[in-house]
Image (cartoon, rainbow, N blue to C red):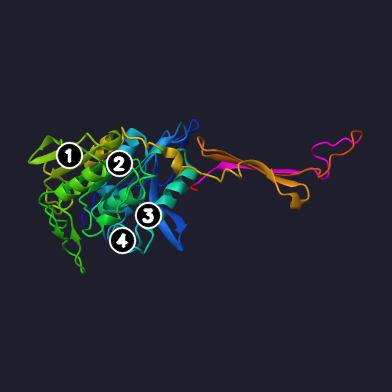
């Protein structure tokens, strides 16, 4: 397995009231009866204003630490001031096939975003996801099933499992970038059987994935090509629905440790930086759908005549991801004018709560 030396701080530092950049490892989230783990990078300006969040998904049999080393996204997050999170799949494997039942990894990643958003000031319009190999296949599933949450998507050395594409039904055109290695020895560039697995998985070619997302994104037939050097290039369809972009890039893996690990490529491209440059211009067109929502019949004050003078007040501030709650008591009958009725007396009580919302 390919490794680089990794230094982990694991400690948050404070200087003049500002939170310095910090990497926390082995964090836990209980979801669906299981304890899931993840690593989180917090940027230096985390407390100053809402910041973007990028999820980075590891490949099959890999883990969060290895993915962080391969993509080096923490370095870019530090420079560009965004949150980055590396979740761990159960047993090293994502449930990445579009529409497949089983471990609810789509739900887990939604819950992870909710948890981080409840702890830090995340910009709900700038939440992105990238992933490598099987993590890149998982990115396509998220583009199909979680386009309400993520603003843009980038797959590295991934694909789409053939036969699952009919289950893909995003509600909008989605910015999508796909990186493939033309000499990939694991996920074949021209499509076919993924190598090294006990059970055969047949995946789309790089061109088929590009054409698939061009179709989903309502793109025109015009495709621009940009040469990157050393036989590497990007093709891009810009004339897509809602001003989105669909991009497919081909590189040559350097062979260290294997051509499949295209973060190391003969063109010397920093794929993490390329992906962030693709993400950065895009904001989710409807980020309010990611915020707390509540039945309109519950918003503001209400009471039940059977509760003997008790009522509830619920006010949601979706633009701030906050909610205010109050339970109160009141006189069931208006007292005579000669009888004072002051807030705080016995029979008049308020209990209030205020805090950030998370999910729905």
Q: Earlier in the sequence, mark 1 or mark 4?
A: 4
Q: Which residue appears farthest toward the bottom when viewing the image? A: 198
What's the mark number on residue 106?
3
Q: CA distance from mark 3 to mark 1?
A: 30 Å
The mark tally for this picture is: 4
Of badges 4 and 3, the one in the foreground is: 3
Q: CA distance from mark 4 to mark 3?
A: 15 Å
In this view of the protein, can residue 5 be seen by the observer?
no
Q: CA distance from mark 2 to mark 4?
A: 30 Å
Of badges 1 and 2, the one in the foreground is: 2
Per the image, label 1 sits on a secondary structure element best described as loop
Magenta span includes 353? yes
Q: Are marks 4 and 3 in contact (CB under 8 Å)?
A: no
How many residues crowd mark 4 within 10 Å: few (<14), some (14–19), many (20+)?
Answer: some
Of badges 3 and 2, the one in the foreground is: 2
Quadrant into which the N terminus falls: bottom left
The magenta-colored residue range is: 339-358
Query: Does 182 sit left or right of 41 as displayed?
Result: left
Q: Earlier in the sequence, mark 3 or mark 1?
A: 3
Q: Position of residue 271 (x, y in %)?
A: 22, 41
Query: Does 65 sit left or right of 343 as displayed?
Result: left
Mark 2 — residue?
173
Per the image, label 3 sits on a secondary structure element best described as helix
Above or below — where is 138 with respect to 102? Answer: above
């Amino acid at each position: 397995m390919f490794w680089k030396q990794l230094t982990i701080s694991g400690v948050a530092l404070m200087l003049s009231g500002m939170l310095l950049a910090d990497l926390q490892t082995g964090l836990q989230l209980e979801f669906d009866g299981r304890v899931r783990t993840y690593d989180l990078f917090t940027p230096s300006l985390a407390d100053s204003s809402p910041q973007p969040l990028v999820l980075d998904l590891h490949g099959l049999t890999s883990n969060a630490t290895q993915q962080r080393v391969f993509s080096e996204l923490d370095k870019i997050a530090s420079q560009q001031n965004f949150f980055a999170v590396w979740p761990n799949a159960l047993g090293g494997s994502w449930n990445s096939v579009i529409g497949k039942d089983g471990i609810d990894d789509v739900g887990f990643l939604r819950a992870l975003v909710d948890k981080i958003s409840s702890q830090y000031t995340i910009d709900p319009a700038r939440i992105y996801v990238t992933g490598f190999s099987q993590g890149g296949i998982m990115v396509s599933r998220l583009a199909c099933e979680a386009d309400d949450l993520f603003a843009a998507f980038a797959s590295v050395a991934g694909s789409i499992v053939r036969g699952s594409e009919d289950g893909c039904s995003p509600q909008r055109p989605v910015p999508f970038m796909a990186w493939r290695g033309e000499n990939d020895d694991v996920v074949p560039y021209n499509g076919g059987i993924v190598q090294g697995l006990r059970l055969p998985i047949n995946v789309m070619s790089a061109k088929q994935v590009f054409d698939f997302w061009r179709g989903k994104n309502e793109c025109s037939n015009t495709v621009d090509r940009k040469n990157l050097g050393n036989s590497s290039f990007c093709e891009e369809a810009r004339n897509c629905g809602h001003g989105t972009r669909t991009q497919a890039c081909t590189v040559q893996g350097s062979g260290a440790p294997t051509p499949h690990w295209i973060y190391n490529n003969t063109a010397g491209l920093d794929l993490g930086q390329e992906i962030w440059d693709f993400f950065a211009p895009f904001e989710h067109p409807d980020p309010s759908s990611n915020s707390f929502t509540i039945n309109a019949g519950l918003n503001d004050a209400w009471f039940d005549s059977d509760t003997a003078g008790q009522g509830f007040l619920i006010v949601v501030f979706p633009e701030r991801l906050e909610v205010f709650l109050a339970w109160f008591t009141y006189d069931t009958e208006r007292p005579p004018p000669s009888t004072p009725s002051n807030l705080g007396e016995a029979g008049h009580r308020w209990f209030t709560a205020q805090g950030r919302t998370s999910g729905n």
